[in-house]
Amino acid sequence: MTRLYNDPVNFVDEATEGFVAAHAQRVCQVPGGVIRSTRSEPGTVAVVIGGGSGHYPAFAGLVGQGLAHGAVMGNLFASPSAQQVYNVCKAANNGAGVLLSFGNYAGDVLHFGQARERLIREGIPCEIVAVIDDVSSAGQDELHKRRGIAGDLTVFKIAAAAAEAGYSLEEVVRVSRAANLRTRSMGVAFDGCTLPGAKDALFHVPAGKMAVGLGIHGEPGISEQDVPSADALAELLVSHLMEEIPDGVGSVEGAKASVLLNGLGSIKYEELFVVYRRVNQLLTEAGLEIVEPEVGELVTSLDMAGASLTLFWLDDELERLWKAPADAPAYRKGSLEAAPPIDASQLDIPDADAIPPASEASIATARCLYQALSATRKIIDQKVEELGRLDAIAGDGDHGIGMQRGAVAAELAAEDAVSRSAGAGTLLRMAAEAWSDRAGGTSGAIWGVMLNALSVTLGDDDAPTPAHYAEGITKAKNDVMAFGKAKLGDKTLVDALAPFSEALEQAVDAGDDLATAWRKAVEACEAAATATSELRPKMGRARPLAEKSLGTPDPGAVSLSLIVAAIQPVIDR
């Protein structure tokens, strides 16, 4: 269990403060995360990594010369918000564009994708490489669906070494993708991890058993077996990884690879060395040349009892970049001349508190939207346990608490916006940032996307008509589907959002007022949310446990239906 904390709500903030104080010669804090406290070469690419906290040394521990230029830090096991990503990128930018890299999780894909679009609109080139090393999370025919675990390190290291060597953004992307496609990992767990303040672990493995194929956010494994000996574990992991040789490697005999044996939090280094002894024997016997292996805690999961093995298949260029020196708080190799410190006063940190002018009509609309967000918070408070129960059937059970955190944060942001005479668009933008920032995860990203879509559509100038709301909901649906890649039938919020959007648009087009049109759309949304119980999930963390979710509606679809129904009385006024 996690034993040392104060208020669990402040755990990440206090951990970040302590981390920066301990490593001020290498990192400094900016809104949303950390960046190097040393100067980078002007006109070079900035590599910004990130994800949820709880995985140290990923992600903040990998910021420093020869490694990442910045790390975005979300809440525990929750993706950072788009605003956090944007802030860190602006502060880390060296003038030649930004590469964003992170594990391939839906919330991260959404939030980092939003930040990328915003940077590009401002003239800052930005590209994304999402790490896909976990062989247990999808088959070879669906590499794009695999999640990122300890293989994060190989991709981050290659990208950063290339940037340090002066590669262009296009070339940094090229070698990062090559590293990504040549990295394979597999993990096991003996017991789950416990969030600060929680009474129990996110999951348990039966005594004497081992979960095979886990993820780093506490996702259960895809199978269980008896706990093996150290040698037998090494043989299991090596045999699985050697079944899948990446394209371009050719014969294993004489090939080169780096090997990462990663402890997930509670496994001691001595235990890892016992396992690595046999890993080394097996790979050497297979004719593989091992290059600068790593054994230790690389990407953890708080106090999870588990380990993972990564094979990173090298070519000449990747080997050179892998061996390049680095000096970060938690990862160092070779020798680097210390760079001079940055001038913090010169950092480009956006002012997120400015309130642009708005019309009286838009200010009045903002007050109504605040009431709608208050109604949202109240219904989520009432249903938080039920939403968590639904999510726990095939997920990690955090949907209810995530939605509650997001709704509370959005209401507070809206209250602040109203007190400062913000328009409708500005209020929704502030609520979107607060929701995604505080909630994190996939639901935080999705609700940030939807509120931002409404923000753009309503703006701060005119009094919105029913057609504006229908247009905004349609944009929200399209944006969610574009960023998250979910389709109808995937058992996600989209299965309720699309019918809601279609019904609202049809009613408005037929001449209904907003209250009448909204009521018809709510009915369609509620029916569609209930119908998701017959679907199997094809996206996100529930996908590997699809059979368990049959008969249970999707929690994201249910929460959407609850919210749009709770807003109806506000519209009726």
Image (cartoon, rainbow, N blue to C red):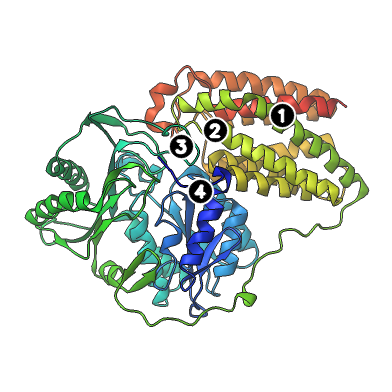
Tag 2–tag 1 contact (CB < 8 Å): no
Residue type at the position of mark 4:
Asp
Mark 1 or 3, closer to the camera:
1
Label 1 – label 3 distance at C-alpha: 27 Å
Element on which disc 4 rests: helix
Numbered badge on residue 108: 4
Q: Does 64 appear above or below 477?
A: below
Nearer the N terminus, badge 4 or badge 2?
A: 4
Query: Given the image, on which type of amino acid does mark 3 rest?
Result: Gly
Q: Residue at x 55, y 70 (%)?
A: 93
Q: What residue is drawn where x is 45% and y is 54%?
A: 102
Q: Nearer the viewer, residue 393 or 132?
A: 393
Residue to which mark 3 is pinned: 540
Mark 1: which amino acid? Answer: Lys
Q: Are marks 4 and 1 in contact (CB under 8 Å)?
A: no
Which label sits in the foreground, 4 or 1? 1
Q: Are marks 4 and 3 in contact (CB under 8 Å)?
A: no
Give the residue number, with chain letter if any, for mark 2: 399
Disc 4 and disc 3: Cα gap in Å? 11 Å
Residue for point 15% across, 50% down: 274
Gap between marks 4 and 1, in whole Å?
27 Å
Horizontally, residue 85 falls left or right of residue 25, namely right
Query: Is residue 112 visible in this depiction of the protein?
Result: no
Tell me the number on the disc at residue 53.
none
